[in-house]
Amino acid sequence: MHSRSKYFFVLISIVFCLNVNYARGQENNDIQPIKPAAGIWLKGDLHVHSRHSTESSNNSILKIINFSKSVKMDYLCITDHDNHVDGDVAHHTWADPEFKSDSLLLLYGAEWTTTRGHGNVFSAKPYNHQNLFDVRDQRDVNIGKVKNSLGVHLSANHPSGKDNFGFSYDLVKSIEIWNSAVWPKNANAIMIWDDMLSSGRMITGRGGSDTHHGTPTASEKPSANTYQAEFNYVGTPTTWVFAKERSLKAIIDALDYGKVSVSSNPFAPRVEFYADTKENGKFEMMMGDNRISTGKPVKFRVQLIGNTLFDTNYTVTVIKNGKKINSYQVSGKVPAVEFTDTPDVKVRTYYRVTVEGTNTAYPQVPKSVALSENMVGLSNPIYFNFDPKF
Ligand SMILES: [Zn+2]
Ligand SMILES: [Zn+2]
């Protein structure tokens, strides 16, 4: 190498190192956790099949509800296959005398099960699901009109592989980025999510166990699929929403606006992600929020709340516009990291994080933890310069 170009190379290397250092975070074991005002974290499962899906076994609604309560779930959406009842969900799942609870918030919904793939519908109140079922093979523009008239939240299910969501993503407000306890098969779903986000779509990432099979009671006959209940059941994974209040409407709002993170199970720590754009230490932004970039550095905070494992190092990976920019090791009572980065003034930027490490045990679904491997949880993005009217 020519001496001048060698000098240039060294200089470039130094500049590069400085940039990396600039993005490096601070680990802080004594960090005071951020508590966002005016809201409540609620956990639940958004993809569950009961006996009203014909291929399910030993999974009555009462059994699902009692199990969900036993693992301290706050909400649930039972999403039976609508094609198994010719679209008449209202007279099957919702009309089941067991479809009620004094403590668990039960969303109205179904799995829209079509030739072009599957989506989940979520609603705070009963809606005419039959209308959506009846237009399933029509042009997306017509489907969009019907969906909007119903005022429901449509979500893309298991977006890669069999029965992938083969419709326009402009129909949905969320996407199932973690389907069932098996983490590794979701890699393509994450890729699709990053493509949608990078193209300017603020689509919420959510989880769903897609469980079909319960543990038989003494009087029930086991099925060939009964073994699955030990591997995958309600809560694998768990979707956390930051809701304004404890209500069905507030859960849907949180899903609409990306106030959501996903954890491997109800006992795994919750991933929280905040940003302080004003350099006043107030962290006024959280997941799902969108601001105009001022060109000034933004301080971000990732924190793990709940049953974190003592003496465990978690790896927090930061993804900016679909690309990994850094990762940090965190541990302690409230594992947390702060880092600084400057979103571009002119173009869109989003940041999201994943958390990997040893998973917290889930004794009620004991074999799920091995299937989730090292994935503990994922955040939704914090957005800059996205068009809210897109
Ligand atoms: Zn499905
Ligand atoms: Zn399903």
Image (spheres, rainbow, N blue to C red):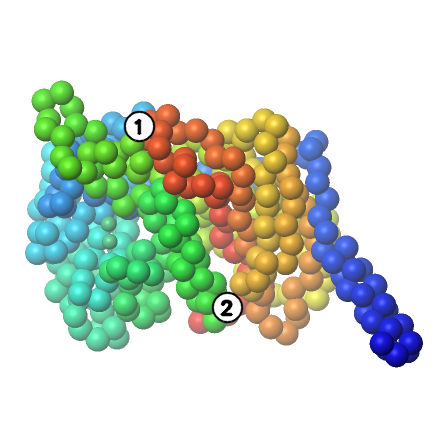
Q: Residue at x 9, y 22 (%)?
A: 219
Percent x, y for residue 168? 32, 70
Q: Quadrant of residue 334?
A: top right
Q: Give neighbour class at mark 2: few <14, some 14-19, many 20+ (Cα, 10 Å).
A: some
Q: Residue at x 63, y 74 (%)?
A: 346
Q: Residue at x 46, y 67 (%)?
A: 195
Percent x, y for residue 109? 23, 49
Percent x, y for residue 350? 56, 61
Q: Give neighbour class at mark 1: few <14, some 14-19, many 20+ (Cα, 10 Å).
A: some
User: Split into 4 quadrants, where in the image is the C terminus?
Assistant: bottom left
What's under tag 2, amino acid-wise?
Ser
Circle 1: element type:
helix
Tell me the distance, in whole angstroms, between the alpha carbons under discs 1 and 2: 38 Å
Circle 2: element type:
helix
Of residues 4 and 265, the one nearer the viewer is 4
Residue picked out by circle 2: 198
Is residue 8 rendered to the left or right of residue 338? right
What's under tag 1, amino acid-wise?
Lys
Q: Quadrant of residue 64?
A: top left
Residue picked out by circle 1: 69
First of labels 1, 2 by sequence position:
1
As displayed, is residue 133 above or below residue 225? Answer: below
Percent x, y for residue 262? 44, 45
Nearer the observer: mark 1 or 2; the answer is 2
Quick check: can you spot residue 128?
Answer: no
Q: Quadrant of residue 205?
A: bottom left
